[in-house]
């Protein structure tokens, strides 16, 4: 990656697309059986958590 060649980016992108994302989707599917999953799904993104947004945690802070 130090030489800024396209091949390492292709390998990392392939790993991300073929291994990381399917595992995240399997985790979400297995967690969906719990009643708290809807709140979890509303407060979290697929890859990056929603730090700014109108989610339930921010609404609780605004109410207090």
Image (tube, rainbow, N blue to C red):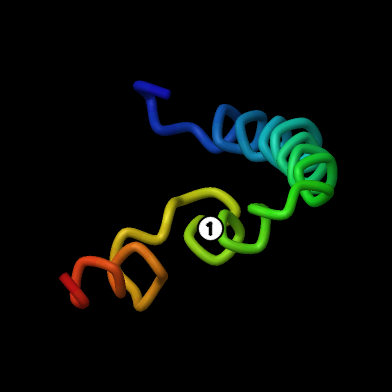
Q: Is residue 33 left or right of residue 8?
A: right
Measured as percent of width and height from the top left, residue 47 is found at: 54, 49
Measured as percent of width and height from the top left, residue 26 is found at: 83, 40
The residue located at (43%, 52%) in the rendering is: 49
> Please, is residue 57 above or below residue 11 in the view?
below
The residue located at (34%, 62%) in the rendering is: 57
> Please, is residue 64 above or below residue 12 in the view?
below
Measured as percent of width and height from the top left, residue 62 is found at: 19, 75
The residue located at (83%, 48%) in the rendering is: 33
Q: Residue furthest top?
A: 2
Specify the quadrant of the image occupied by residue 12. top right
Q: Residue furthest front?
A: 64
Q: Which secondary structure, mark 1?
A: loop
Residue nearer the viewer, 55 or 1: 55
Specify the quadrant of the image occupied by residue 22. top right
The residue located at (77%, 31%) in the rendering is: 19
For the C terminus, the quadrant is bottom left
Residue nearer the viewer, 13 or 38: 38
Residue nearer the viewer, 56 or 4: 56
Disc 1: which residue: 45
Measured as percent of width and height from the top left, residue 40 is found at: 57, 54
> Please, is residue 53 above or below residue 14 in the view?
below
Mark 1 burial class by Cα count in 10 Å: few <14, some 14-19, many 20+: few
Give the total number of marks visible in the rendering: 1
């Amino acid at each position: 990656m130090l030489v800024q060649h396209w091949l390492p980016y292709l390998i990392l992108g392939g790993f991300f697309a073929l291994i990381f994302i399917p595992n995240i989707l399997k985790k979400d599917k297995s967690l969906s059986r719990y009643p708290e999953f809807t709140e979890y799904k509303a407060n979290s993104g697929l890859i990056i958590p929603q730090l700014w947004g109108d989610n339930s945690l921010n609404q609780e802070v605004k109410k207090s």
